[in-house]
Image (cartoon, rainbow, N blue to C red):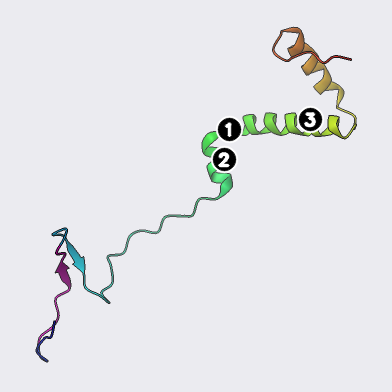
Amino acid sequence: MPFADEADPPSTWECRTHSTESPAVGAKPPSRPAKPPRTPWDMLLERRSIPQLEQLLNERLNLRRRTRNLPVPEEIRAQEALLASLCILPRETP
């Protein structure tokens, strides 16, 4: 759409299909406060607490030790035996 040389183009235009106002091409949109980026660690902490993560880490490390035939700490064996006796963990067959 041509304008007169002295005329300033409008800062917003009305959308033909949505009847909403949009900024003109080249106009700067209103600035929003920057949202800090979420890291994978932040997302993990939204789902689990630190004690839960420590327990999960210990379980996975022990599973890894068993698959590689590495020694499992005695206190972990005692905890697992107690949980198995309470029918919380399945008993291992020798």
How many numbered discs?
Answer: 3
| Quadrant, the N terminus | bottom left
Label 2 element class? helix
Q: Foreground: 54 or 2? A: 2
Instruction: Write down the residue under mark 1.
Output: 49
Give coordinates of residue 19: x percent, y percent: 13, 59
The residue that label 3 is drawn on is: 63
Are the residues tagged 2 and 3 within 8 Å (C-beta)?
A: no
Whether pointer 3 and pointer 1 mark residues with C-beta atoms closer than 8 Å, the reply is no
Q: Is residue 64 left or right of residue 16?
A: right
Q: Is residue 24 above or below residue 89?
A: below
Give, as a three-letter code, the residue at label 2: Leu
Q: Distance of mark 3 from mark 1, alpha carbons?
A: 21 Å
Instruction: Identify the magenta region.
Output: 7-16
Residue 71 location, quadrant: top right
Predominant SS along the magenta part: loop
> At 76% from the left edge and 12% from the top edge, which residue is drawn?
84
